[in-house]
Amino acid sequence: MKTGSKSEGPSTPALRRDPYEVLSVSRDSTDQEIKSAYRKLALKYHPDKNGSNPEASELFKEVAYSYSILSDPEKRRQYDSAGFEALDASGMDMEIDLSNLGTVNTMFAALFSKLGVPIKTTISANVLEEALNGTVTVRPLPIGTSVSGKVDKQCAHFFGVTINEEQAQAGIVIRVTSTAQSKFKLLFFEQDVSGGYSLALQEDSEKSGKVTSAGLYFLHFQVYRMDSTVNALAMAKDPEAAFFKRLEGLQPCEVSELKAGTHIFAVYGDNFFKTAAYTIEALCTKNYEETTEKLKDIEAQILRKRNELRQFETEYRKALARFQEVTNRYNEEKQSVDELLKQRDGIHASFTISKSANHIGASAMSNGSSSKSTGDDAKVENLGEDGTSDEKDKSFKKRWFNIPRGSDKKLG
């Protein structure tokens, strides 16, 4: 299993041949004819029957790869219009034969499953061959009842559901749930001309809330199954593509109604390392008419929404490209404005007096102050020598000290 930038599909052969040639069918073959051809070739070349024969292993991969293209209406249309190039561009899902994996590869596949990359597994050739030979044990599952059990990995429990004409006309639903969140497949087998049973439909379990579940609905109108592995790697690489491709996994089921009689179903253990715990139930939709109409309506809405999303994706991609363009322009303009303002601040900061100029100015101011102080002192001294205040003081002292004794009364 490759995890590179391009996935070419389930068990992609090194050299790819025309899928119609590989399956020995014509380009106008029906889905049923393609499916029948695949069953025979897949069983013929299955690794379980051919041991370590490398030629059979490669042929099995080629058959599985060709069927993965022709069994999907959209992939078949792409191939018919533009060959393998169209499939390479859109990407394809993966499918591995769990029954033929060694311990290391099984752990590797389990790791990818744990990481959220859905891995589609094939059914053991032993189970298919036993069913085709009619040697399986079939337990009864009456309408309106349920059966619980545990099935080993790569093994299957078979059930026979018998319905009358009234129940066939009303519609039948077969559902399997696992509160242990086990991984399993729900299988539907048709009566084969050899007297055994050949695989007609399979539904992989999906996690929903706290349980895993799978269902087959025979309601007299086109019903659909959700294949989560469609473009799984492409969606993992591009989260936005995951949204737009999500509804592409809605695939039409080949069988939409059952006739009166006994029909064979099976629960296949699809866990990597342990048994699968399950509960299977069979019911008639006679008492679920309102629910059946809701299902019919909601699936019609989903199909319309899928077409709308195909158109919207083109608009979104264009808008996203434009958004990226203006976002880049925004970052460039922001950087340009920041740089201009930085230069402007630098220019403003250059308007300042240098330190040497400040030192010279301070010295000049200091010298000027000294001169002024000297002038003021001289002025004070001149005031003492102007013959005014000093002369009066001397005259007063002379007259005071020259007064004869005893003449103080005269002065009084």
Image: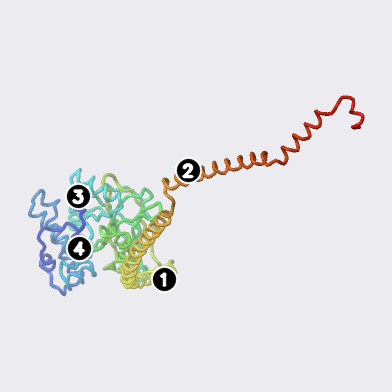
Q: Reading the chain from its start, which is encountered first: label 3 or label 4?
A: 4
Q: Which residue is mark 4?
A: 68
2 or 1: mark nearer the eye: 2
Identify the mark at residue 363; answer none if there is no mark.
2
Q: CA distance from mark 2 to mark 1?
A: 102 Å
SS state under label 2 = helix
- Residue 297, by quadrant, is bottom left
SS state under label 4 = helix
Depicted 204 relative to depicted 306: above or below = above
Seen from this angle, which residue lies furthest top? 405
Q: CA distance from mark 3 to mark 4?
A: 19 Å
- Residue 378, by quadrant, is top right
The picture places residue 304, in percent across and down from the top left corner, at: 35, 73
SS state under label 3 = helix
Q: CA distance from mark 3 to mark 2?
A: 100 Å
Whether tag 2 and tag 1 are in contact, CB under 8 A, the answer is: no
SS state under label 1 = helix
Whether tag 1 and tag 4 are in contact, CB under 8 A, the answer is: no
Q: Reading the chain from its start, which is encountered first: label 2 or label 1?
A: 1
Q: Amino acid at mark 1?
A: Glu
Confirm whether residue 55 shows in the render.
yes
Nearer to the camera, 38 or 136 = 38
Identify the mark at residue 99; answer none if there is no mark.
3
Q: Amino acid at mark 4?
A: Ser
The picture places residue 366, in percent across and down from the top left corner, at: 51, 42
Confirm whether residue 164 shows in the render.
no
Q: Which residue is mark 1?
A: 293
Q: Left of 52 or right of it: where is 338?
A: right
Q: Amino acid at mark 2?
A: Ser
The picture places residue 155, in percent across and down from the top left corner, at: 24, 50
Q: Reading the chain from its start, which is encountered first: label 1 or label 3?
A: 3
Q: Reading the chain from its start, which is encountered first: label 3 or label 2?
A: 3
